[in-house]
Image: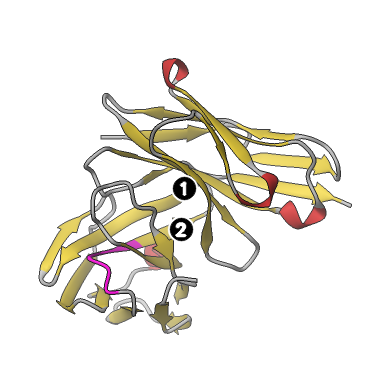
Amino acid sequence: AQSVSQHNHHVILSEAASLELGCNYSYGGTVNLFWYVQYPGQHLQLLLKYFSGDPLVKGIKGFEAEFIKSKFSFNLRKPSVQWSDTAEYFCAVNGKGNNRLAFGKGNQVVVIP
Amino acid sequence: DAGITQSPRHKVTETGTPVTLRCHQTENHRYMYWYRQDPGHGLRLIHYSYGVKDTDKGEVSDGYSVSRSKTEDFLLTLESATSSQTSVYFCAISPGQGSNQPQHFGDGTRLSIL
């Protein structure tokens, strides 16, 4: 079964700072990888996804993530955050051919104006 | 946004009572999921469905049952609610044509068991 670890569960930073959230997964085969964002009081929304090809994936709102297969990692980055990026961020993984997602415990990000 | 409607959006009930949450989709997607979200635990899969009358357990299925009699509706039932089932419940859907399909989530149901 797949599993996901997210580090630095609570992150506080100022506007214009750079953000990087770590995500490591455990699975013995080929995977699909996702980052979801949950703004306060809202449902989860897809930020970006990786299925195959270029390991550097660009998503919405200036976010990107890099898949490093040798490290079983899929870290999320944004060069310059805004107050509106305050949210909880979840990494998720499923094995190819498996429709069940495993989620990490989330990163609570607070951006101070 | 994906056409997913969860009802009710909020519910408060007492321990020992039965509770049913409904997820309705207008996308004709094959797969439907129920998750619970708790602080420090992220999202955990309760049950999922891969077609009408086809369901399977997730990682935290104890105390919950599900039914899917129509493509568009997926019901989650707590037969006898307990305080540990106080949570926010999310429904998700995906086409299920291969695993390369992201799941899309409903707005959630906040359930409090007193």
Q: Amino acid at mark 1?
A: His
Q: Is residue A44 visible?
A: yes
Asked if labels 2 and 1 share a chain, the reply is yes
Residue identifier under label 2: B37
Chain under disc 2? B
- Where's the N terminus of chain A, which quadrant? top left
Left or right? Give the position of A49 relative to B35: right
Mark 1, residue position: B41
Image coordinates for residue B109, horizontal then vertical, percent: 45, 74
Instruction: Give B25 or B48, whichever is nearer the viewer.
Output: B25
Which stretch is magenta?
Answer: B28-34
Is residue A91 positioned above or below B36 on the image?
Answer: above
Question: Is A28 in the magenta?
Answer: no
Query: Percent x, y for residue A106?
Result: 54, 45
Q: Label 2: few (<14), some or many (≥20) within 10 Å?
A: some
- B30 part of magenta stretch: yes
Left or right of A77, for residue B72: left
Which residue is most to the left? B53
Separation of marks 2 and 1 at Cα, in angstroms? 7 Å
